[in-house]
Image (cartoon, rainbow, N blue to C red):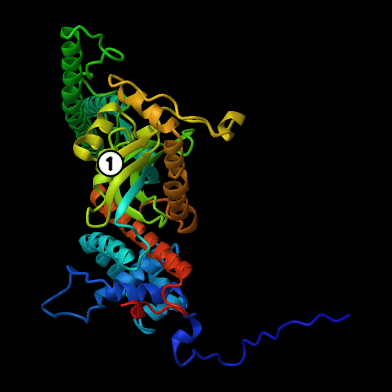
Amino acid sequence: MSTHYVNIDRETPMLLPPDLRDWLPENHLAHFILDAVTLLPIQGFRVNLRGSGSDQYPPSMMLSLLIYCYATGRMGSRQIEAATYTDVAARYICGGSAHPDHDTICEFRRQNGKVFEESFVKVLAYAQELGVLKKRGGVSVDGTKIQANASKHAAVSYQRAGELIEQCEREVKELMAQAEAADRSPVPEGLKVPEEIARRQARKAKLETARQVIEARFEERRKAQQADYEAKMAEREKRRKEGKPPRGREPQAPPERPEDKAQYNFTDPESRIMKAGNGDHFEQAYNAQAAVDTEGSQLVLGARVTEECNDKEQLGASIKSVNTSVREVTEVLADSGFFSDEVVREVEADGGPVVYAAVEKQGHHRTVADLIPQPDPPAPTASASVAETMRHRLRTAAGKAKYALRKQTVEPVFGIIKAVMGFRRFLLRGKTKVTLEWNLVTLAYNFKRLFRLVQRTSVFGQGWIVKSAT
C-alpha cells in the first residue's frame, strides 16, 4: 500500500501575491488593529516637526506595529524588527517594504508613554461605542508580580551593606599600610595598591548610597505609619473616654530604623525582592496592578505599577487608575491581600463604590453545605467593625455571587498576559519606564480582547471591517 504525500516544491521561484492582504484572512487581528488605531483621535506623538534628517515612520504605523507584536507575544525591539521581515501581518502593517530598526522601535516606545495612556482610555471609550463595555458597573482588582530587568543577586540588604562598608574600610587601611611599607620592602608582585584602593572606595560609595536610599524609603514609610499609629491611638482613647472598650489589638509604634533585610538593587534600584508564585521563592520584581471589568467584557479598565510588595495599601490607588470617563465604579472585588479596615472605609466614604473583599484567605474546597442554598445570616449591628460587616456581606447570597466574579475576571487576564502573550519580565528599568511598558502590555491585551468580543457579537457581519461601524 503506497503512501501519498503533498508535493513540496522549493525549487520553483516563489513570488509574493500582488496584494499581501491575500495572505491575511478578512477577520485577522492586524486588520482590526490598523482600522481601530486609525479611528482613535490620538494626539501627542513625539515627532520631528522640523522635518530634518531621514523621513520618519508614521506614528500610527509604529503604534499599530507595537500593539500587534505585543499582542502576539513579541516584546523585544529586535524581535519586533525581525517580525517586519518574517511575519506577513507585521509586514502588512508596515506597508510591505518599511522595516523600522530596533533603535527606532526602542526610541518610539520610550518617548510616547503619554500616547499609550491616551490610547488605553480611547480604546475603552471605543468599546463603549461598540456596545461591549458598560458605562457603569463593577471592577475586580488584583496584582501580579512581574520580574524586573535585574537580578536579585545584584541586591544588597541594609545590614549586609553596613558590613561590606566596614570591610572596605578595613581593606583600604591594609592597602595603605602596604603602600607605606613599600619603602622598606617591595610590594607583592601583581598588587597595584592605588587601583585596589580606588576600587574599594568606589564600592564603598555605592554601598553608602544604597544605605541612604533604604533609609530615605524607610523614613517616608515611617511618617505615614506614624500618622496612622497616632490616629489609631486617638480613636482608642476616644472610646475609653466614652466608656467603650477599644477594638482589636493595641497598635504598635513604627520602628525607629530600617529592617536589616531591607533591600537595594544596584541594577534597578526602584524594583524590590518579592515573593513570587505560591510564595516558595523570591524574585526581583514589580507589583503590576489591574482593575478588570466584571460586567462581561473582561477588559482591563485601569493599570498601574507599584514597587510595594504588599497589596494592603493598593486598593484605593488601583480604583483611581480607572478613568471616570470609562467607568463609574459601583462595586469593587478584591482578595484578602487588599483588605484593611482603614482602606475599606476610605474607598466607601462619600458614596464610594461598595467593596467585596475577603477578610481572610478562603479555601477552594466546597462542602455539601456550600452546595445547598442557605438563608442569609442576620445583619450585623450598627457597632460592628468593618471586618464583621465585610464577613456578613460575603456570606449573603448576593455577596457570594458577586465575589465569585473575581476569580473569573482578573485572574484569567493575568493568565493570558503571562501564558498566552508571554509577558513575564519587564524589558525596561525604573518605575516610570516599567509603568509605560505595563500600559503598553494592557493596551495590547485590550485590543486582543476587544477583537474577540466584536467577533463574538458579530457587530460587523461578514468579515472584519471596523470602518463600517462608523
Residue 233 falls left or right of residue 339: left
Most extreme residue toward the left is 50
In the image shown, does 76 or 443 lie closer to the viewer? 443
Residue at 55 percent across and 90 percent down: it is 14
Crowd around label 1: few <14 · some 14–19 · many ≥20 (10 Å): some
The image position of residue 455, as x and y in percent, is 46, 70
Q: To which quarter of the image does residue 65 belong?
A: bottom left
The image position of residue 448, as x and y in percent, is 42, 64
- For label 1, the SS is loop
Quarter holding the C terminus is bottom left
Q: To which quarter of the image does residue 191 belong?
A: top left
Residue 242 falls left or right of residue 64: left
* Res 77 visible: yes
Residue at 15 percent across and 8 percent down: it is 241
Residue at 20 percent across and 60 percent down: it is 114
Q: What residue type is labelled 1?
A: Pro
* Res 428 visible: no
* Relative height, residue 319 to residue 44 (above, below): above
Identify residue for label 1.
353
Residue 400 falls left or right of residue 253: right
* Relative height, residue 360 to residue 418 (above, below): above
Quarter holding the N terminus is bottom right
* Relative height, residue 269 to residue 372 (above, below): below
In the image shown, does 122 or 214 lie closer to the viewer? 122
The image position of residue 3, as x and y in percent, is 81, 80
* Relative height, residue 49 to residue 311 (above, below): below
In the image shown, does 432 or 402 lie closer to the viewer? 402
